[in-house]
Amino acid sequence: LNVTHECKNYFEENAEYNVIYHRFKIHDNQSEDLLSGIKECLNFIGSWGEVDRIYLVITFLDNAIKNQGKVLVHCAQGRSRSPSIVIAYLMYRHNMTYQQAFEVVRESRDYLHINEGFIRQLKNLELEFQ
């Protein structure tokens, strides 16, 4: 899951790797709408209509895990966008609070610097998931 507008999908054209890519073009700035902008993310799985983007990302990740696949969620530096997506997934799928999910992600990637706008949106999402 490529969550950048600037990084290309390097192995998309190479069938040898058997990689399914999806690009979710997101900018790392405080005014970026992280949650309501994910609609496009899983159009290749099916017709989703007006479902919030974050639920599409969650479905994409669930589908990969269910099929015993591995998922690489990446952005340009791995500090804000991709950790935010993983945190949202953990909050939803594992009923974690923002802080609990943040700590799990930080255990794997200790250099996090999530922008304030994303943090605010994730904390709002936490309230929605309760």
Image: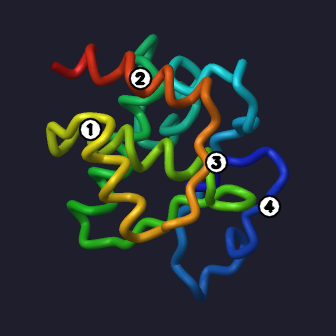
Label 3 vs label 4, nearer the camera = 3
Instruction: Identify the residue under disc 1.
Output: 91
C-alpha gap between disc 3 and disc 4: 10 Å
Q: Secondary structure at mark 3?
A: loop
C-alpha gap between disc 1 and disc 3: 18 Å
Q: Is residue 15 above or below residue 10?
A: below
Q: Nearer the viewer, residue 29 or 112?
A: 112
Q: Nearer the viewer, residue 33 or 57?
A: 33
Q: Secondary structure at mark 1?
A: helix
In x, y percent, where is residue 10? 75, 72
In x, y percent, where is residue 113? 61, 49
In x, y percent, where is residue 31? 72, 18
Amino acid beneath label 3: Val
In x, y percent, where is residue 119? 50, 30
Counting residues from the N terminus, which is met first, the one under dot 2 or under dot 3? 3
Counting residues from the N terminus, which is met first, the one under dot 4 or under dot 2? 4
Whether the residues at callouts 4 and 2 have beta carbons within 8 Å, the answer is no
Label 2 vs label 1, nearer the camera = 1
Q: Is residue 109 left or right of residue 107?
A: right
Residue 3 marker? 3
